[in-house]
Amino acid sequence: MKTNITADAGGANAGGDGAATSTSASATDANANVNAAATTSNSANAVNAAANANVNAAANADATDGGVVGGAGAGAGSGGGGAGDTTNSPCLIEGVVRALECLRARCPLTHCMTNGVVKEFTANVLLAVGASPAMIEHAEEAREFATMADALLVNLGTLDDAQMEAMRGAIPAYRRAGKPWVLDPVAVGALGVRTRFAREIAGCQPALIRGNASEIIGLCGRASRGRGTDSGDGAEEALDAARELAARTGAVVLATGAVDYATDGARVRSCANGHVWMTRVTGAGCAQGALAAAFAAVCGERLVAALAAAVVMAVAGESAAARTAGPGGFRVALVDELSRIDGESLRRRARVA
Amino acid sequence: MKTNITADAGGANAGGDGAATSTSASATDANANVNAAATTSNSANAVNAAANANVNAAANADATDGGVVGGAGAGAGSGGGGAGDTTNSPCLIEGVVRALECLRARCPLTHCMTNGVVKEFTANVLLAVGASPAMIEHAEEAREFATMADALLVNLGTLDDAQMEAMRGAIPAYRRAGKPWVLDPVAVGALGVRTRFAREIAGCQPALIRGNASEIIGLCGRASRGRGTDSGDGAEEALDAARELAARTGAVVLATGAVDYATDGARVRSCANGHVWMTRVTGAGCAQGALAAAFAAVCGERLVAALAAAVVMAVAGESAAARTAGPGGFRVALVDELSRIDGESLRRRARVA
Amino acid sequence: MKTNITADAGGANAGGDGAATSTSASATDANANVNAAATTSNSANAVNAAANANVNAAANADATDGGVVGGAGAGAGSGGGGAGDTTNSPCLIEGVVRALECLRARCPLTHCMTNGVVKEFTANVLLAVGASPAMIEHAEEAREFATMADALLVNLGTLDDAQMEAMRGAIPAYRRAGKPWVLDPVAVGALGVRTRFAREIAGCQPALIRGNASEIIGLCGRASRGRGTDSGDGAEEALDAARELAARTGAVVLATGAVDYATDGARVRSCANGHVWMTRVTGAGCAQGALAAAFAAVCGERLVAALAAAVVMAVAGESAAARTAGPGGFRVALVDELSRIDGESLRRRARVA
């Protein structure tokens, strides 16, 4: 499995990235410090949290071995690929860790032109991770904002004519400003207007495209089995389409599912973390797209940015599921875990290749 | 009390329903099983959850006897009506249980054209119960989606001109496709544009109409005492209007309040479950409308679908209130309880007639 | 000080209203008792919760003295102003307490024309405190609603052309009806369309204007350092701009930050409560604007209404932070605390001057 993974670039890029950007420990760090202090001085909670974490970590190991949908059998040590695959998972993880550190140091202002179902959750996810969300809708302001924000997310979930017009103006403004934009082609392939629109803007040099298997297949122009926002196709089935789409658009493509795959057309990275409950709350995928935009803003190597968005969301999801009993509590815990995730938890849990 | 309940059809319909649809134990069941396993393997949490459930069940029994607003004195054994009323509550409950099983087996794709306040909550409620939400807004796509989705909700909460146009196109498309649509006439009677629009589309054969007392009275053309989304009228006062509206439109009408009433113009079903906190979080009523659409998609007998939407939401609300201390936590717990509700809890708690 | 508080109206309203409504210690109280019991019987959690509360209260005192971003050193006793300032903090607090009692007695119907990110949270905050939210968007209905609602919030967060048109109609309708409207100039100063629009409507006699430092400075026409919805300026730096804006528009201006300041151009009130986590969840500021509208509806003295919105939100935020470990849980707890806040907690915690 994962025989397509090329080993050369993961470590090198990751290294290059982190060095360039992790230096600016500015205002946001002050916040981080204040919060850390507050959390630490709340000793009873800290102790409890630790205790819970231990219990849950153990419980979760069981759950993910046996319970995750399409779990891909990617247990400890499974990160290696086929013969000749020299991918170094620790290097990939270190790249993700550095990307997260950069994001927290720079707090990228992330402009989300997204759907009406997930705006609040998306904003809270970005805030929890350490980015700054902004939801500007007006066509003129959306263009203007390209000079201020650090990245743009274009999510087609509840597309209407006014939003299409605003997106058509904003995307070239971000390109002119040299800032990345991310396309999340929600339900593309299933519905006509958005499929045509997504194919149109996919030609405008997105830095990243993030979608489930059916959306990636549909955007690529192949027949998909999507049903609304549900994917009827497996992420692995989408990998061919993702490679083709990456080659055609120049974007890094993140195709999500039980295993998430990121590809620039040549190289492929994968993340086998996650939990089925992430499909039982609305907005986890859409928020992952926003995270991808935030990471793209701080991370020159877009393949690392895509992998970071996948891993950070999925590892936080596993942690959240391990301490909750239903989707309502899970959604709350997911935001908490995103604020708490760090290099240590990533190194302990991430299953990337 | 409940002397208006006619006894004839409840059992028969419920029986008819279940047999037709509960066979397809497909993909969604797999998820249900996986989740159950995951929860169980998180043993420390599971034990606590079980303990809480027991404690809360007891506490809740007290609460519903003495505390529910307008509680209607409908304790255990109160399901019977006046003299000559032979309604068989157990049969009604079994119909609701089968409807819930059908919903989980078939995971109906539920298209919600709803207001901007409750989109996320509505989506999470549908996901928790076991349905699949989709919020398509664009007029052309909303029509197109009628060929894919299983039912449509039309909620007028934050109506604007574009949404009216899209609804005007989508409703006949669902009718042509032979799929049910549900009208939730939020604040109708109080405001002009939506009152005219609601009366217009009420003529387009909705399968169900769900509203609070003032909304049902207002849609019927009588003087109501609604104030924004608050009802100034009692659900029992609305029963006459509901019967008239059902007779006139052909819809089953669900008039909600301390007691929810469902009627097809002749027969009346009631649900005396619920908790005052459901009126202290936004969106519980709107999400109930979405549930009604999901049930209508899987349940040929619309009176059962309406009752199921009422009972499932109200019983989950009681369970959630029994283990929370404020509206914030209640809203989270309500989603959890909706994912957990099953035949056993419905049989133990439902107070239907 | 607060010598400007007219003693007659506050007490009269509270007394008049309160008598009518405070007697019904019914369903909701019963629930509170039941829930408390349920929580207690979950003994392990209850013990921890209690322990946390104590620890956190202590931790929080430390945090707010030393740790809150831009903490302003506003500890006990720091409220005093220049020579001759006879501010009497207890009187200020009693004014806030009476405003909260009035709000709960009268449950003002609060029309929120607000942004798409925070509609649900705003509604839940209003419901939790005891007001009744309504989100009417259609231009014709928004005008019509002025005859029914008690106050209007105009929040520019996700402004578009249709919303501007609707706001342009609604504002004069509220003025004609003699009802207060509140302006929340989100991201004004940073973006052109909304800055022009905000300056236009600021001339239409808003009762209150609420914004962060950069927004107040930007609305005033000075150069601000705002970045999206983030303020780049301190609230104290904004105080001059706030005074000028108040004098020019006739509004009471609430400039928020680590310390919130309310001014009518001459008098200044401040609130030093709050917690850094309020900046780490979306919508706390926007919901504060909605609270300000609800308070303005019941509170003739607008300076008290502004202070009440600031204090109620900030004290609830402190309480919520003291019992949660991350922004997800904090957001849930904030709603709970808003439903629970009362005269006793305000008197114990409020740090106003």
Image (spheres, coloured by chain):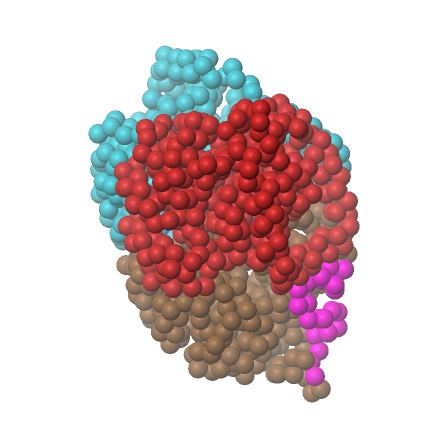
Chain colours: A brown, B red, C cyan
Q: Residue at x 71, y 54 (%)?
A: B36
Left or right: B221, with A35 as reference point: left
- Picture coordinates of residue C153 (x, y %)? 34, 37
Which quarter of the figure is the N terminus of chain C placed in? Answer: top left
Front residue of C103/B97: it is B97
Front residue of C101/A223: it is A223
The answer to if A73 sits in the magenta stretch is yes
Q: Is residue B5 visible?
A: yes
- Picture coordinates of residue C84 (x, y %)? 38, 19
Q: Is residue C221 visible?
A: no
- Picture coordinates of residue C13 (x, y %)? 39, 16
Front residue of B130/A320: it is B130
Using the image, determine if residue A242 lies above or below residue C285: below
Q: Residue at x 73, y 34 (%)?
A: B55
Q: Residue at x 45, y 14 (%)?
A: C20
- Picture coordinates of residue C17 (x, y %)? 42, 16
Query: In the image, which residues are magenta?
Result: A62-82
Which quarter of the figure is the C terminus of chain C placed in? Answer: top left
Magenta part, dominant SS:
loop
On the image, which quarter does residue C65 sit in?
Answer: top right
Left or right: B296, with A87 as reference point: left
